[in-house]
Amino acid sequence: MHGRSSLTGVSGVIDSVSWVHVRERRTLFVRTHGRHRFYLPGGKREAGESDVACLCREVAEELGVRLEESSLRRFADLDEPADGYTDGRRVRMTAYTGRATGTLTPSGEIAELAWFGSEDADRVPAAGRRVLALLAERDEID
């Protein structure tokens, strides 16, 4: 979920999907231009778009890689405070794991990539911290 995710409806909920990509016990995060926090790759659905279609589109746009749809697995359903809002907005994020082909290359709105562990939790918003905690519980990251 990135800062560009828009509010859906009038409920004060930002609806998004994200890709949880772990390599050598570190999780991939991205930082958009003009922001200081790092977010999980992904974004919000377009009208009528499925989770998988949205995630594949967003990851291709942001990172220049193609997700292997058959490898995508639901990792977690998150409901956390939205970053950058003081009005109580929430992020409802469905996070997926899966394989990708290609070379990770920041593009478009992405300024940089980073690989974080639990010790970097202060550099990511609540949803990212929750993913890092879940990975640590599952011993997939330290």
Image (cartoon, rainbow, N blue to C red):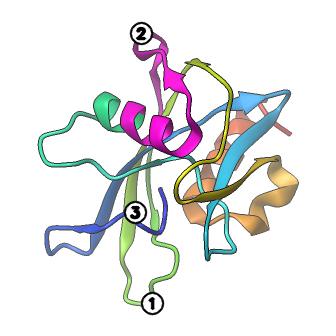
x and y, in percent, of residue 117 in the image: 82, 47
The amino acid type found where label 2 is placed reads Ser
| Residue 58 belongs to magenta span | yes
Task: Tell which tag, 2 or 3, sits nearer the viewer.
Answer: 2
Q: Is residue 77 visible?
A: yes
The kind of residue on which mark 3 rests is Val
Residue 46 as seen in the image, left or right of residue 32: left
Residue 17 vs 66, above or below: the answer is: below
Q: Which label belongs to residue 91?
A: 3
Camera-nearest label, 1 or 2: 2
Q: Which is more toward the observer, 25 or 109?
A: 109
Disc 1 is placed on an element classified as loop
**Amino acid carrying mark 1 in the image:** Thr
Q: Residues within 10 Å of mark 3 (few under 14, many from 20)?
A: many
Residue 72 lies within the magenta run: yes
Label 1, on which residue?
A: 86
Badges 1 and 3: C-beta atoms under 8 Å apart? no
- The x, y position of residue 87, in whole percent, is 37, 89
Specify the quadrant that holds the C terminus: top right
Chain part drawn in magenta: 56-76
Q: Would you name the residue on which mark 2 appears?
A: 70
What SS does tag 2 mark?
helix
